[in-house]
Image (cartoon, helix red, strand yellow):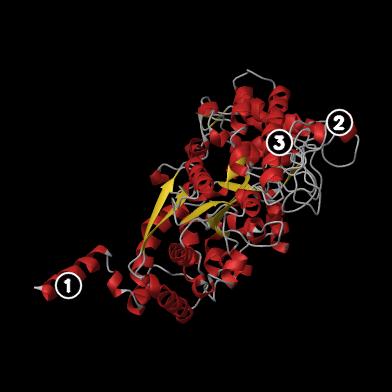
Amino acid sequence: MKKRLMAAVAVAAMVSFGGAAYAGPSEAKKWVDSEFQPSALSKSEQMKEMEWFIKASEPFKGMEINVLSEGVPTHTYESETLTKAFEEITGIKVNHQILGEGEVVQAVQTQMQTNRNLYDAYINDSDLIGTHSRLQLAVNLTDWMAGEGKDVTNPMLDVDDFIGKSFTTGPDGKLYQLPDQQFANLYWFRKDWFDRPDLKKQFKARYGYELGVPVNWSAYEDIAEFFSVYVKEIDGKKIYGHMDYGKRAPDLGWRMTDAWLSMAGAGSKGLPNGIPVDEWGIRMEAGTCNPVGASVSRGGAANGPAAVYAIRKWDEWLRKYAPPGAASYDFYQSLPALSQGNVAQQIFWYTAFTAVMVQSQSEGNNTVDADGTPLWRMAPSPHGPYWVDGQKLGYQDAGSWTLFKSTPVDRRKAAWLYAQFVVSKTVDVRKSHVGLTFIRDSTINHQSFTDRAPKLGGLVEFYRSPDRVMWSPTGVNVPDYPKLAQIWWQQIGDVNSGAFTPQEAMDRLASEMYQVMARMQAADEAAGTYGGCGPRLNDEQDPSVWLNKPGSPKAKVNEKPQGETIDYEELVKRWNKG
C-alpha cells in the first residue's frame, strides 16, 4: 500500500509540473531545432548554453516561481512560449503575469515599501535606476553575479553585448537591472505621401523649403498644418497632420517624462542623460548623487521657458492637427491608430508598435502595400528651439529584469535563471523577430535582420546607426521614480482641459516636485533612506540668476525658427556610413 501511494504521488508530481520530470538535453534540442531559430549562436553553441541551464537548474527543479511585466508583444511571447520552453528544459515552472505599466510600477513600489515578496522578479523600466541604486532594496547585479548568484549566472551571458547596459548602471558603477526589451520614441511619417511630386511642390511653394523628414519642431508644425489644413484629403479620405494622446491617466505623465521636455531642449548636454539638468528638469551636479531642485528658482528646468514651450506645443498640436477624439486616447489607443492610414506623421511614436504597423492589409493595416512593404518610415525625432548638439534627442524604454532582496534566495536564483534564459543569445534573435525590441548588438547585426530590414520601415537601420545613443530612458537624477512620476499627469491633464495655462501647470508641478523631494531629503537625513543620495535642495533664488547662467535652465529664445528638413534617403546614407 505504501509503495502504491508513493508511486501515485510521483505520477501526480510529474503531471503537476507539466513535464518537468523529463527536463534535459532532448527537450532542449527540440526547442533549439524548431523555435529557437534563427540565433546568433550555432546549434552546437545553443546546446552548450542550454546544457548549462539544465545543470544550473537542478537544485530548483519542480519549483514554481512568479514574475511580472507590462504588456508588450515581447512579454506576451515570453509569457506564452518561453515559459513553456524553460519549464520543459529546466523543470522550473514560471507564472509570467502581464499587467499594465502603472500596475507593474505599483507592485514594485509595494514590494519595496512592505518588504513582502509579491513576485520573484520583475521586468520594470530602467527609469527606476535612480530609485533602485539609492534605496538599495534591489539586488546589485554586479555583486550578485560575482558572489551569491555566481552559481546561477550564465557564463555565456555576455553583459557587454547589451546595448542598454549604461541605462541600468547606477551612479556607483554597479549594474542593478538587466535589459529584456528596448524601444525608442522616434518620428514616424507616410513616406508615400511625402514622395508625391504634387505635394512636394505645394509644400515648397507655401513654406519655402522641401517637404521631408523634419529636423526641428518648426518643420514638424509646418508639415502638420500643411496636411491638416491645406491637403485635407488624400484619395478621397480625410487626413490629419499629427497624432498624439491626452487622456487623463498615468500614461499621460509618462508621455512627458519620456524625454518630451528634453526633445524641446530643456535639459543640459550629456549622454545618456543631461548633466547637470536632466529631461525631467531635475538638477544634480556632476560627480554627486544628490538632486538639488527642479524649479528654475533652485537651478532646475521643470518650469522654465523650454519646458513650458514643450507643453504648449503638445497641447496646441493635439487640438489643431490631430484626429477628433485623440485627446481622449491613452498610450495604447493612440499608437496603433496610425494603421487606419489617415495620419501623415507622428512626432512621438514608439518603435514597440512596429510589429503592429507591419501587419498585412488583410489584418486591417492600411499603411503597407499589397506585398506587406511599409508605406511609412521611422526617422530621428525632430528637436525644439532650445535643443543644442550634445543633448539627448528622445526616449528609449528599457524594460529590465530586477531582483529584490526581499525575495528568498532560492526563489531569486530560480527567477534569475529564467531572466537570463529569455535574454540569452540562444533565444534573443528569435524573440526579437517576434517583438522587434532589440537589446543585443549580436542580434541587431544578425543577417536575418539585414534580410528583413526592408519590411521594417527603418528600424534596423536606426538601431545599427550611431544616432541611437541619443535616445535614453530616465536617468539617475530622478531619486524616486514612483513617487515623482505620479504627480505629472494631473498637471498635464489640467492643460489639456483648459483649467491651467502651460506656465501655471509647470509652476505647480515644480512646486509639487519640491514638496516630494523635501520629504525624501528629510527621510534621508534622518534615517539614510536613500543611502545618503537623497535630495539636498538648493535655497530659492530669483529665477533670473539661473536663467542668465550658461546651460540649463535656459532663457527664452526665438521659438519659431525657420523649418528645416532632410531627405530620408540622405538620412539612411548617413546612418549606413555610421
Q: Amino acid at mark 1?
A: Met
The residue singled out by tag 3 in the image is 518
Residues at discs 3 and 1 in contact (Cβ within 8 Å): no
State the separation of the CA atoms marked 3 and 1: 62 Å
Q: Is residue 143 left or right of residue 389?
A: left
Q: Is residue 22 left or right of residue 229?
A: left
Secondary structure under badge 3? helix
- Where residue 490 appears, as percent x and y from the top left, is 59, 28
Dot 2 crowding, Cα within 10 Å, few <14, some 14–19, many 20+ = few
**Residue at 56% of width from left, 66% of height from top?**
443
Nearer the observer, 565 or 449: 449
Pick the quarter of the image with the N terminus.
Answer: bottom left
Q: Is residue 50 visible?
A: yes
Q: Amino acid at mark 2?
A: Gln
- Where residue 570 appears, as percent x and y from the top left, is 72, 53
Query: How many numbered badges does the structure rendering display?
Result: 3
The residue singled out by tag 1 in the image is 6
Nearer the observer, 317 or 84: 84
State the separation of the CA atoms marked 1 and 2: 77 Å
Mark nearest the camera among 1 and 2 is: 1
The residue singled out by tag 2 in the image is 541
